[in-house]
Image (tube, rainbow, N blue to C red):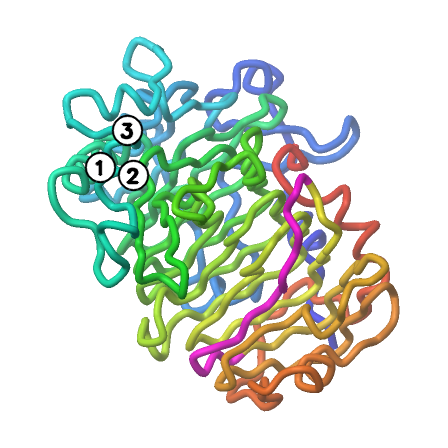
């Protein structure tokens, strides 16, 4: 029997009264009304419902639900956000409410910072960098080193100090409804901490001013950038809910080419690496992005961890990694994948199972345009597994693994070593997902 739906779980957490003054000011308990005649929901103190994916395992995920008034903040600028997050050593429960859009690339006075500001005084310039490491003279056998590479790294470190926001344990970071809450140009770094909630935020324009040239990456080399919009590194018990991720307003089609390769300024949208574990990613919108979600940073990342649930998300205009999975036990259910090319982002594949990953993908819906190939919806290296049923392509039940294996020499395995049990909200029938998820996912939905 299916577990109670996510919506029912939310209803159980409703409270009975709300202060109109609190609603207007966005302070205090921060309670908001769902409908004029409905009970109120305390969005900021809400915790992950029972059995809602891997993040509900063990102690569950409560974030900053127990925060006292001294650890409850409403912020609207970069400086306020940094102060509210405090030190990684302060693990007291905290709630950080973001009102409006915070631009990570602003100084203490609110002045907009540019790539030139970060490069000033380092000696770095892209023109000099290109001259120094042109494969025609530098070769293709080793990573860049020397004066310009050191200058590039110094400039990148300056940007990192500005745009990376380190989230401590036992924290809820949540957008205030009705304020277009989000972070542009920045990265939430959830590293080696436990019990974090990220909700109702729009992440955009996470860009690296100083990509590094790697001539050894692939047969033709590649430009590699830093900064994911949200990155999990060695993190446990994390719930990412009702967020929106996009490259906008700068899309990859506007990137120039250097050394014949795209000068890529975007990295991941939400990456889960370095032995992260017990993560639930639900009701988010991933749009206009290339390398979207990486689970496991290498084939030797961390066996026995990387347990992730991904459900009721929308993926549209996504080129690849939705997600790319390694080693872990990953449950992917009730997602809608729209593989139409959007803003120049032409999908290559959706789910990649490699390095012995154990994926269960069930009751997902793929919208594939005319001429699209079902065999291209999956990818793998011949060691990963994908089990599960109930997946639809344009409304028709489809065996995705069989379609992929028929066209590929590196077969995806169909047996996994685990059975999902933390499946709250699982809808066995996927046919209505494009309609239902269109209005229930992403930032700005929660009230």
Secondary element type, mark 2? helix
- For residue 162, the mark is 3
Q: Secondary structure at mark 1?
A: helix
Discs 2/1, front: 2
* Residue lying furthest front: 136
Q: Which residues are magenta?
A: 343-358
Label 1: which residue? 152
Q: Which residue is mark 2?
A: 130
Residue 436 part of the magenta-drawn span: no
Q: CA distance from mark 2 to mark 1?
A: 11 Å
Real-space Cα distance between discs 3 and 2?
Answer: 25 Å
Nearest the viewer among 188 and 38 is: 188
Which residue is located at x 64 percent, y 65 percent?
Answer: 424
Which is more foreground, mark 3 or mark 2? 2
Taking the spot 29% from the left edge, 16% from the top edge, the residue there is 107
Label the magenta part by its dominant secondary structure: loop
**Quadrant in the picture for residue 164:** top left
- 404 vs 283: above or below: below
The quarter of the picture where residue 165 lies is top left
Residue 350 in magenta stretch: yes
Q: Residues within 10 Å of mark 3 (few under 14, many from 20)?
A: many
Q: Identify the residue at horizontal 67%, vertical 29% (top origin).
A: 33
Q: Is residue 122 left or right of residue 444?
A: left
Name the image quarter holding residue 106: top left
Foreground of the two, 152 or 431 = 152
Dot 1 or dot 3: first in sequence order is 1
Residue 122 location (% of width, % of height): 15, 27
Local packing at callout 1 (Cα closer than 10 Å; few below 14, some 14-19, many 20+) is many
C-alpha gap between disc 1 and disc 3 = 16 Å
Vertical side of 354 occupied by 230: above or below: above
């Amino acid at each position: 029997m299916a577990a109670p739906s996510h919506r029912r779980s939310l209803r159980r957490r409703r409270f009975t009264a709300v202060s109109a003054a609190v609603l207007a000011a966005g302070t205090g308990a921060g309670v908001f009304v769902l409908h004029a005649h409905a009970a109120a929901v305390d969005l900021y103190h809400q915790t992950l419902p029972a059995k809602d994916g891997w993040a509900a395992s063990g102690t569950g995920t409560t974030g900053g639900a127990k925060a006292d008034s001294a650890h409850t903040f409403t912020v609207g600028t970069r400086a306020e956000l940094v102060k509210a997050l405090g030190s990684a050593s302060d693990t007291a429960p905290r709630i950080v409410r973001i009102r409006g859009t915070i631009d990570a690339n602003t100084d203490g006075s609110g002045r907009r910072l540019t790539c030139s500001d970060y490069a000033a005084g380092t000696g770095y310039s892209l023109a000099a960098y290109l001259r120094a490491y042109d494969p025609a003279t530098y070769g293709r056998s080793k990573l860049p080193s020397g004066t310009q590479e050191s200058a590039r790294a110094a400039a990148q470190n300056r940007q990192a100090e500005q745009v990376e926001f380190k989230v401590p344990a036992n924290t809820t970071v949540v957008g205030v409804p009705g304020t277009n809450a989000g972070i542009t140009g920045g990265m939430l770094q959830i590293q080696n901490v436990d019990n974090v909630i990220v909700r109702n935020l729009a992440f955009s324009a996470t860009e690296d001013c100083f990509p590094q040239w790697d001539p050894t990456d692939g047969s033709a080399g590649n430009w590699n950038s830093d900064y994911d919009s949200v990155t999990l590194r060695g993190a446990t018990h994390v719930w990412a809910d009702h967020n929106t991720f996009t490259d906008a307003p700068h899309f990859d089609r506007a990137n120039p080419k250097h050394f014949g390769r795209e000068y890529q300024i975007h990295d991941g949208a939400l990456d889960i690496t370095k032995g992260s574990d017990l993560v639930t990613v639900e009701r988010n919108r991933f749009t206009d992005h290339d390398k979207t979600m990486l689970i496991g940073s290498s084939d030797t990342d961390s066996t026995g961890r990387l347990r992730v649930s991904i459900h009721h998300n929308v993926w549209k205009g996504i080129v690849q990694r939705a997600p790319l999975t390694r080693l872990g036990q990953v449950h992917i259910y009730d997602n809608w994948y729209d593989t139409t090319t959007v803003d120049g982002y032409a999908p290559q594949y959706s789910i990649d199972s490699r390095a012995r990953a154990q994926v269960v993908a069930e009751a997902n819906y793929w919208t594939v345009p005319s001429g699209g190939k079902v065999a291209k919806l999956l990818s793998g290296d011949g060691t990963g597994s994908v089990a599960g049923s109930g997946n639809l392509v344009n409304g028709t039940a489809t065996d995705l693994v069989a379609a992929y294996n028929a066209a590929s020499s590196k077969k995806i395995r169909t047996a996994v070593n685990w059975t999902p049990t933390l499946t709250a909200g699982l809808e066995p029938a996927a046919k209505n997902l494009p309609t239902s998820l269109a209005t229930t996912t992403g930032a700005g939905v929660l009230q």
